[in-house]
């Protein structure tokens, strides 16, 4: 069996390359120029939830995020996803943007 490669994030956490890849694919969709208004709002809500686990998701954003496997249907975020979101985003609200989550030199 092939060993899973782990990737070190800017947060110091290590995540599987597969979890990183699928999470970044979902984040790229939410942050793309083609994202709907609902997806853009879901991106803001996702980052807010990652920064504050007690945050209550607004409206249908929970369904959008669950459809992308970024939260479960109880609106909980897996710790690896949280670490990737924290490492891959900067800014606030409408000024959020994506950056490389990987620790430089890794």
Image (cartoon, grey):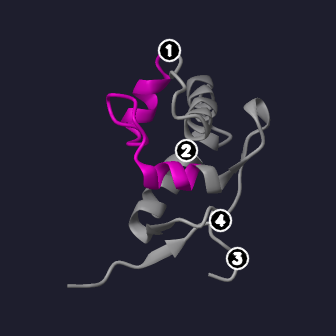
Rendered-image quadrant of the N terminus? bottom left
The residue located at (62%, 24%) in the rendering is 37
Of helix, strand and loop, which one carries label 2? helix
**Coordinates of residue 3 in the picture (x, y in percent):** 30, 83
**Residue 74 is inside the magenta segment:** yes
Are dots 2 and 4 in contact, CB under 8 Å?
Answer: no
Of helix, strand and loop, which one carries label 3? loop
Instruction: Specify the segment rendered in magenta.
Output: 60-85
Separation of residues labelled 1 and 4 (CA atoms): 31 Å
Q: Which residue is mark 2?
A: 29
Q: Nearer the viewer, mark 1 or mark 2?
A: 1
The residue located at (49%, 24%) in the rendering is 61
Indicate whether 98 appears above or below 37.
Answer: below
**Coordinates of residue 48 in the picture (x, y in percent):** 62, 33
Image disc number at residue 10: 4
Q: Judge from the rendering whether residue 80 lies leftward or rightward of residue 99; answer left or right.
A: left
Sequence-wise, which precedes: disc 4 or disc 3? 4
Image disc number at residue 59: 1
Image disc number at residue 35: none
**Coordinates of residue 92 in the picture (x, y in percent):** 76, 36
Q: Nearer the viewer, mark 3 or mark 2?
A: 3
Sequence-wise, which precedes: disc 1 or disc 4? 4
Sequence-wise, which precedes: disc 1 or disc 2? 2
Of helix, strand and loop, which one carries label 1? loop
Sequence-wise, which precedes: disc 2 or disc 4? 4
Separation of residues labelled 1 and 3 (CA atoms): 37 Å
Sequence-wise, which precedes: disc 1 or disc 3? 1
Of helix, strand and loop, which one carries label 4? loop
Separation of residues labelled 2 and 4 (CA atoms): 21 Å
């Amino acid at each position: 069996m092939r060993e899973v490669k782990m990737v070190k994030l800017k947060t110091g956490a290590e995540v599987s390359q597969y979890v990183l890849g699928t999470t970044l694919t979902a984040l790229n969709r939410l942050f793309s120029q083609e994202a709907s208004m609902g997806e853009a709002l879901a991106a803001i809500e996702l980052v807010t939830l990652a920064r504050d686990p007690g945050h209550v998701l607004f409206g249908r954003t929970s369904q959008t995020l669950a459809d992308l496997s970024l939260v479960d249907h109880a609106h909980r975020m897996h710790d690896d996803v949280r670490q990737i979101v924290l490492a891959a985003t900067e800014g606030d609200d409408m000024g959020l943007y994506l950056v490389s989550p990987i620790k430089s030199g890794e």
